[in-house]
Amino acid sequence: MEYISTRGNVGKLGFIDAFMMGLGDDGGLLVPREIPVVSAEKMEEWQHLSYQELVLAIFSLYTNGEIPQQDLKDLVYASYGTFRDPHITPVRKLKDDLYLLELFHGPTFAFKDIALQFMGQLYTYVATKQGKKIHILGATSGDTGASAIEGVKGKEGIKICILHPHGKVSKVQELQMTTVQDDNVLNLSVDGNFDDCQRMIKELFADLDFKATHHLAAINSINFVRIMAQTVYYFYAYFQVVKETGAKQVNFSVPTGNFGDIFAGYLAKRMGLPVGKLILATNENNILERFIQEGVYMPGEFVATYSPSMDIQVASNFERYLYYVLGEDAAEIRKRMEQFKSEGKIVIDGEALAKVQTEFGAYSVQGKECLETITRYESSNGYLLDPHSACGVAAADGFTGNQEITISLATAHPAKFNEAIALCGIEQPFPEEISALFEKPQRQTRVDGTLPSVVKELVAFYTG
Ligand SMILES: *Cc1c(COP(=O)(O)O)cnc(C)c1O
């Protein structure tokens, strides 16, 4: 498997090189040259695999044998050994036609752990094998930062700097990031929102001199490895639900902001997983819903919501999807992205828009509906949803396009977002790991939202 850029100007890369490059050197996003398609026999076999075995089977399609099988196996088992549930991503039945896929049983209680535990292992592996310095740089709306730090804190040869929007992450998210005392961790609390953080990160990755001098590595979903790791639970959930119900095809409802998680679902579908609709669930920051309804991709006004991890206007992974929907035409993507830069929007219509609308449904959940959904499922099903998962469930309920079973992704544990839960008048017990955070001292550096200020802190940290 070779990797290429959506903008066509990156030579064919191997798996490790694509992992290390993160953002394409031409500013595009890396994608596999051809999406591997899983045969019917393989699908039959895969039904019986454990989560870890399924990870190995899927990763092997992407890694080109660049990592010896036993090493890959060790990395995978170490990654998922930190999860609290033996099924890693268990499925719960909420109603006859609605299942919940719990993705929050990793160390930081959000779905980011599924990819980032593995990426932490893989960075450590590359740092050791190749004797390389690795300086991870990432932006977070809250969960990616905590999870990435957890994956590499204290690791030899690795430093990690995470930018988060000051005052715009939940208390637990902030504590998870800032109570880590290891010297290889720097938290920058940036005046601005997530889009500002992500834009600065992308600018730094696009500065190839800076990137090389400071050994930058990416953990955001601009890194293809994150997407690859997230395809696994779509397969695993499908197999579990099919076993129980005999369904032939399912929908997935996916709370998304950066188009990362739902792009992993799209990739799983392209690999041959029988997915009906991918239902895109957003909050008031509904740029992606508008794209699916009208074909217009245009960032609007940023809104702070009860589901802060989805408070995103500019969705990094959108470019990957655009690449496929426009027929894998890199020249066209270059043109469209230039246009986006100068005019602030991308418009598609005709056949391409029709394709988007057969593949996706979209539903944006307003704050009031989010809280009502939490309250309703708590009282009628005895199940406490976090506000992101509630958006997914509300979208699944609101989407009546067909009669198929829908699997809705539960992307975080409710204890991470007690702000919203408390507004519902619900008192929840905190897991011990989370309660313990409130006792620990915090370490973070506040910076204004300008690139030079960020660069100053970064350089001091990476060269110090
Ligand atoms: C990151 C995150 C999302 C959105 O994920 P995308 O990669 O933007 O699709 C949803 N819910 C939670 C809890 C998250 O942390």
Image (cartoon, rainbow, N blue to C red):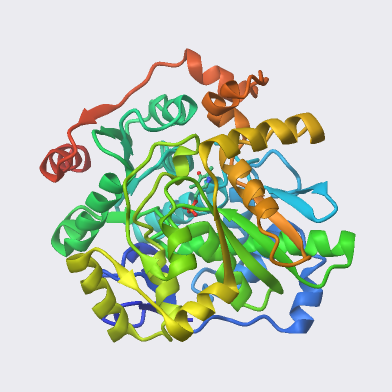
Q: Is residue 214 left or right of residue 418?
A: left
When asked about the image quadrant of residue 455, the answer is: top left
| Residue visible at 69% across and 38% down in the picture | 84
Q: Is residue 453 left or right of residue 384?
A: left
Viewer-proximal residue among 255 and 357 = 357
Image coords of residue 38 (percent x, y): 67, 80
Viewer-proximal residue among 284 and 129 = 284
Viewer-proximal residue among 194 and 147 = 194
Image coords of residue 403 (percent x, y): 78, 65
Outermost residue, top direction?
Answer: 439
Instruction: Please indicate, yes or no, whether residue 16 appears anywhere in the rendered image.
Output: yes
Instruction: Please indicate, yes or no, whether residue 157 appears anywhere in the rendered image.
Output: no
In the depicted structure, whether residue 89 falls above or below residue 432:
below
| Residue visible at 55% across and 36% down in the picture | 108
Q: Is residue 406 left or right of residue 462?
A: right
| Residue visible at 62% across and 52% down in the picture | 395
In the depicted structure, whether residue 444 falls above or below residue 456:
above
Q: Quadrant of the C terminus?
A: top left
When asked about the image quadrant of residue 382, the answer is: top right
Image coords of residue 441 (percent x, y): 39, 16
Number of labels in the image equals 0
Image coords of residue 235 (percent x, y): 69, 65
